[in-house]
Structure formats: C-alpha cells, structure tokens
Amino acid sequence: MNRLLSLLALLLAVLLTGCATHLQQKENFLREAGFRTVKPSTPEQIAHFQSLRQGHISHETRNGQTLHMLADPGQHILLVGGDAEYERYQEILYAKVVDPDTASAKFTQGLENAWNNGWGAVLGSLVPQ
C-alpha cells in the first residue's frame, strides 16, 4: 500500500511540474520560431493585453495581416508573430512534442514501466477470474 501511495505521489508531482512549465515551453518554442516580445505600455495596449486569453495563442487580423499572440500575465509580456513565425512554431511543436512515432514509443514504454514496477500486480488483481 505504501508503494502505491508513493507511486501516486510521484505521478502527481510529475504532472504538476509539467503544468508549471507548459507555458514556459510554449514561450520558448515561440521565441525559437521568431516571435518577438512586446511589453504593453500604453493604456490601449494594456487593455488589449488584459482582454486576451492568458497563456493561449490568440489570432487577430489587422490591416490584412494575421497576428498570432501569446499573453503571459506573470511576466506581463506579449509574444507576437506573423503567419510565417506561427507556421515555424507549429513545425517546432510537431518535431519536439507531437511526433507520433516518438509519442507512441514514449507512451508504450511508460505503460511497460508502470506494469513492470508493480501496477501489473495491482491492476491484475482487479480483473475477475
């Protein structure tokens, strides 16, 4: 039972750490893709910044051009890029996070590790004979 609680505590810690760094990772990918950092300074910019969904990429069309923006309230910054930068961001995201071969292999390995480290006995005992 202690081992099960330890595994659950470790899983929770990993999940919480992943959530805390998700915004940082997204910002790093956007910067790598060429997004520029803007610090809102005028009342209009601040009002617009506050109207954006924080931590999510927003899309707006201005003067016929699409702008892609990410608002980070913790740092009070806005990351801004055009279509070319956004396309590059998607390529980076796919290559580093979404690649199906990598994701599938990691998931399968994680299941094998969980099963071999005691979850097999726990879950196997729940299956009716």
Image (cartoon, grey):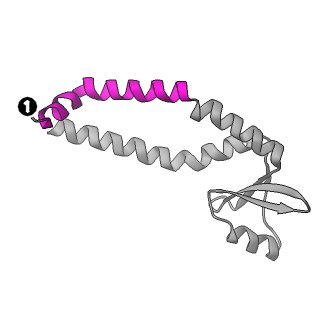
* Residue type, mark 1 in image: Gln
Q: Which residue is mark 1?
A: 129
Would residue 32 be visible to someone looking at this image? Answer: no
Q: Would you identify the image quadrant in which residue 87 lies?
A: top right
Image quarter of residue 42: bottom right
Is 119 placed above or below 64 here?
Answer: above
Dominant SS in magenta? helix
Q: Tag 1, which secondary structure?
A: loop
In this view of the protein, can residue 5 be seen by the observer? yes
| Residue 57 within the segment the image draws in magenta | no
Residue at image x 68%, y 42%?
A: 28
What span is colored magenta in the figure?
100-127
Identified at 34% across, 41% down, the residue is 11
Residue 69 horizontal/vertical position (percent): 74, 56
Q: Residue 128 in the image: x percent, y percent?
A: 10, 35
**Where does residue 75 sit, x and y in percent of width and height?**
66, 58
Whether residue 61 sits left or right of residue 17 in the image: it is right
Q: Residue at x 78, y 47 (%)?
A: 35
Q: On screen, 105 above or below 3?
A: above
